[in-house]
Amino acid sequence: MPALPVAAACPISLTASQRQRLKKAAFGHKTPHQARIRAQVVLHAARGHSNARIARETGLHLDTVRRWRGRFSQGGLPALADARRSGRPARFAPVQVAETKALACQLPAETGIPLSRWSCPELAAELTARGITGPVSASTFEGVPLGAQEYVVSSDEKTSIQASCRCHPTLSPGAARAMRVNHTYGRGGALAYLAAYDVHRAKVFGRTGIEPFMALVAQVMSQEPYASAKRVFWIVDNGSSHRGTKAADRLATAFPNAVLVHTPVHASWLNQVEIYFSVVQRKVVSPNDFTNLTQVRDRLRDFEDRYNATAQPFQWRFTTSELDDLLARLDRRTTDHQEEFSAAQSA
């Protein structure tokens, strides 16, 4: 049976201008990968190379080489661009897109929002609040139950929040440019942020400055529903301001319906207020760019109000059985260390 004839490759000839543009695309560091490969195919073809040889040298499929060689032969440089594709109608009008980009390219503090930078959910919520758009998906920018009148409050301190005044103004993000923060700064002091977080109501109570833990407790327990609650469980770590049985007794004496519960030593991450503090770190404190402590204090208070207006409880997935397993591993590790120490002492 005679072999089928092989179609001849399209001959390619280039003008000086075309050759210069193709070389720039084929070897430019900022050229997208697809555009670079297509330009290389055409340059190889202009040297008279066969499609099979081009496929071997570029690592492309033979049909891919044939397609881009043919498209250039028929349409020149414009034919190397991606063809226009159909898609669903645009959801947002050009004016909405422009206003969204303008807001995203401003520092939140410049618009009166108590944030250091925009996150996608915060930007989506602000667009809706301003009436620029309807509800927007952020992904597109996209044990034993407690009884009635029982609450759980998670509390801790975030210390050493500094006021770092940058020597040059922070620049908001722009086209192809991230937000720029000067690395040199002057120190404006530091303060502590005490916070109590109701884990089921997603409500935060905060105080700033060097204040005792009991001042925060009094702030919360003096208001409803905690003042008349059956029990309020205060979850704390083993920090010096609320360590041990003395702190528990002091709390119970001042507020008989309050119960102090300590997290295991070295496991303060179990306290849900730490999640809230991580939100504060990402959305309020970083990058640290404050002229003085008053700005820090005002930003924290304003963010607290903003957070309480829309917050939802954290989806806590660490179960009591997982905690039991963790504590058992810690016990085994402690026992092993004690046995190793005893053996070393007796040797």
Image (tube, rainbow, N blue to C red):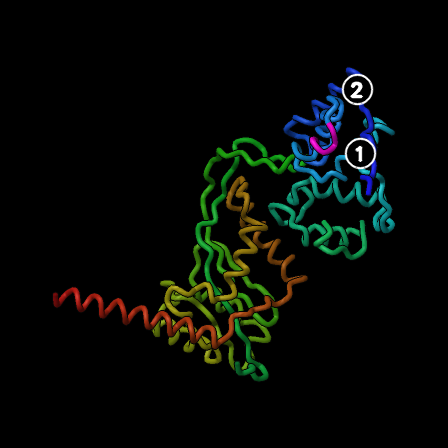
Regarding mark 2 in the picture, which secondary structure is present there? loop
Q: Quadrant of the N terminus?
A: top right
Q: Which of 218 and 258 lies nearest the eye of the viewer?
A: 258
- Magenta stretch holds residue 64: no
Q: Number of numbered discs present?
A: 2
Name the N-terminal-most of marks 2 and 1.
2
10 Å crowding of disc 1: few (<14), some (14-19), many (20+): few
Which residues lie in the magenta part? Answer: 50-54
Q: Amino acid at mark 2?
A: Leu
Name the residue at 28% across, 72% down.
Answer: 335
Q: Is residue 298 visible?
A: no
Q: Quadrant of the C terminus?
A: bottom left
Quadrant hosting residue 170: top right
Q: Which mark is residue 108?
A: none
Q: Locate residue 251, reporting x and y percent.
A: 42, 74
Instruction: Please name which of the two marks, 2 or 1, marks the residue nearer to the observer.
Output: 2
Quadrant hosting residue 172: top right
- Cα gap from disc 2 to disc 1, whole angstroms: 17 Å
Q: Locate residue 213, reporting x and y percent.
A: 44, 64
Q: Amino acid at mark 1?
A: Ala
Name the residue at 65% across, 47% down.
Answer: 118
Taking 260 as reference, is 37 left or right? right
Q: Locate residue 263, reporting x and y percent.
A: 42, 70
Q: Which mark is residue 14?
A: 2
Q: Locate residue 167, reporting x and y percent.
A: 52, 32
Magenta segment, prevailing SS (helix, strand or loop): helix
10 Å crowding of disc 2: few (<14), some (14-19), many (20+): some
